[in-house]
Image (tube, rainbow, N blue to C red):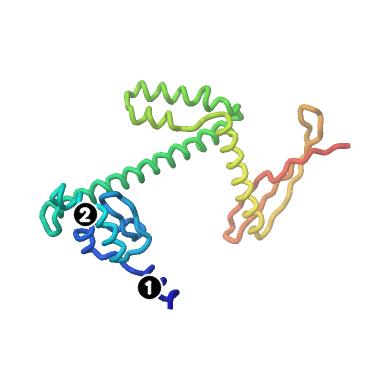
């Protein structure tokens, strides 16, 4: 009985009439949120909303003159809902900007890796160049975004390591899915005169997609 009651309570839907009656609105998760103190209740039950509303009833009805059913009360609810929606949109926009700055860090790290540049050049060369560009353009938003890009030596190193793991993972998936393949071996020596065995693979998939990649570089001793 208790279990069934708890399940039925958790499935209660928010009632639109509670907006004007108890000054609650439905949060993005579907829970009841008080627009006065912005606290969220765990269950959408009328009894809980009524008990919470009584904490603010004196302030709302007597001091602010927001009597239930009045025009001022309805305008108060509409204004509060608009303000809260604007704040949510701002948080979403900031989240998108942060994601864009993270993507920029990976793109710059990828370029440094392809050009065989030191990890420190991201912070010592690339970022100052971007900052100078933002100042010349005179756009404060670009300057703010440039300052938020993480290009420290440690960050660039972690980005390149993650990109390397991702490329290796993609190559393994392609090798496992190919229908036919051939191997090519080549031997050379590094600057320390240690023999290096290069292993290349050329494969073809079910859709006749050809690929050729270096899958291994092994040091040979003795």
Q: Residue at x 55, y 36 (%)?
A: 110
Residue 87 found in image quarter = top left
Does residue 37 appear left or right of residue 157 in this picture?
left
Distance between mark 1 and mark 2 Cα atoms: 29 Å
Q: Position of residue 176 (x, y in %)?
A: 66, 57
Q: Which residue is mark 2?
A: 57
Q: Position of residue 157 (x, y in %)?
A: 59, 34
Cβ–Cβ under 8 Å for marks 1 and 2: no
Residue at 32%, 43% in the rendered image: 90
Task: Give the foreground label among 1 and 2.
Answer: 2
Check disc 1: other Cα within 10 Å, few if <14, some if 14-19, many if 20+.
few
Q: Residue at x 43, y 26 (%)?
A: 130
| Residue 83 higher or lower than 104, as above or below | below
Residue that numbered label 1 is attached to: 8
Residue displayed at 62% across by 50% down: 169
User: Residue 140 placed where, x, y %?
Assistant: 33, 27
6 left or right of 33 in image: right
Q: Quadrant of residue 139?
A: top left
Q: Quadrant of residue 163?
A: top right
């Amino acid at each position: 009985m208790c279990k069934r009651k708890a399940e039925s309570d958790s499935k209660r839907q928010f009632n639109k009439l509670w907006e004007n009656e108890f000054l609650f609105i439905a949060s993005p998760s579907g829970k009841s949120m008080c627009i006065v103190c912005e606290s969220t209740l765990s269950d959408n039950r009328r009894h809980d909303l009524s008990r919470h509303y009584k904490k603010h009833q004196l302030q709302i009805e007597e001091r602010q003159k927001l009597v239930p059913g009045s025009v001022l009360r309805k305008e108060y609810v509409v204004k509060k809902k608009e303000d809260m929606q604007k704040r949510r949109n701002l948080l979403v926009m900031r989240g998108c900007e942060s994601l864009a700055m993270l993507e920029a860090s990976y793109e710059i790290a990828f370029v440094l890796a392809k050009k065989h540049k030191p990890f420190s050049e991201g912070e010592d060369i690339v970022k100052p160049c971007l900052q100078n560009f933002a100042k010349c353009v005179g756009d404060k938003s670009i300057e703010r975004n440039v300052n938020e890009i993480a290009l420290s030596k440690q960050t660039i190193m972690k980005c390149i390591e993650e990109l390397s793991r991702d490329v290796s993972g993609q190559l393994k998936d392609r090798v496992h899915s190919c229908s036919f393949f051939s191997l090519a071996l080549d031997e050379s020596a590094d600057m320390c005169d240690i023999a290096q065995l290069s292993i290349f693979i050329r494969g073809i998939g079910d859709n006749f997609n050809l690929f050729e990649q270096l899958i291994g570089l092994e040091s040979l001793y003795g």
